[in-house]
């Protein structure tokens, strides 16, 4: 669900509607080292709309495939591949 600045541009160029689902993402390492990253942020109520955007749908499918093939906790998260499993919201 994490995007580089280049990937962000690719998503927006491919479909400008994707911009509403892209948020700035910052972790401690990003802050300390001046890095810029983005993430897809899709609320449960927005999944249908987001899946109409090809690049987002592909990324969600890749996330689901990865989670299904990973460990126990990742498998639990496979049911909601459009969002981060651990969230503080």
Image (spheres, helix red, strand yellow):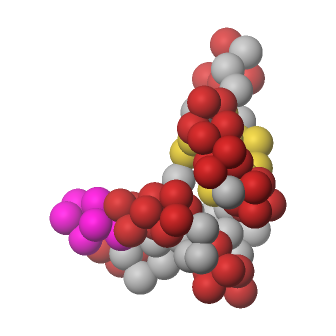
In this rendering, position of residue 48 left or right of residue 77: right
| Residue visible at 67% across and 37% down in the picture | 9
Residue placed furthest toward the left: 69
| Depicted 43 relative to depicted 25: above or below | below
What quarter of the picture does the C terminus occupy?
Answer: bottom right
Please state the horizontal and vertical placement of residue 68, each as a whole percent of the image.
Answer: 25, 71
Residue placed furthest toward the front: 14
The segment highlighted magenta reads 64-71
Please state the horizontal and vertical placement of residue 13, each as a whole percent of the image.
Answer: 68, 45
Q: Nearer the viewer, residue 75 or 11?
A: 11
In this rendering, position of residue 89 left or right of residue 81: right
Kindly report the secondary structure that dominates the magenta region of the rendered protein.
Answer: helix
Please state the horizontal and vertical placement of residue 25, each as a whole percent of the image.
Answer: 70, 41
Q: Is residue 45 magenta?
A: no
Q: How many marks?
A: 0
Residue 66 seen in the current view: yes
Q: Is residue 65 magenta?
A: yes
Residue 88 seen in the current view: no
Tell me the quarter of the picture where residue 38 sits: top right
Tell me the quarter of the picture where residue 70 sits: bottom left
| Residue visible at 70% across and 26% down in the picture | 36
| Residue visible at 60% across and 41% down in the picture | 10
| Residue visible at 30% across and 73% down in the picture | 75
In this rendering, position of residue 80 left or right of residue 14: left
Please state the horizontal and vertical placement of residue 81, each as a whole percent of the image.
Answer: 46, 71
């Amino acid at each position: 669900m994490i995007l580089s600045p280049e990937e962000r541009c690719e998503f927006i160029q491919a479909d400008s509607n994707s911009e509403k689902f892209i948020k700035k993402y910052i972790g401690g390492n990003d802050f300390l080292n001046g890095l810029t990253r983005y993430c897809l942020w899709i609320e449960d109520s927005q999944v249908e709309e987001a899946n109409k955007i090809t690049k987002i749908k592909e990324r969600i499918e890749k996330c689901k495939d990865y989670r299904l093939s990973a460990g126990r906790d990742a498998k639990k998260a496979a049911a909601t591949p459009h969002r981060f499993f651990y969230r503080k919201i």
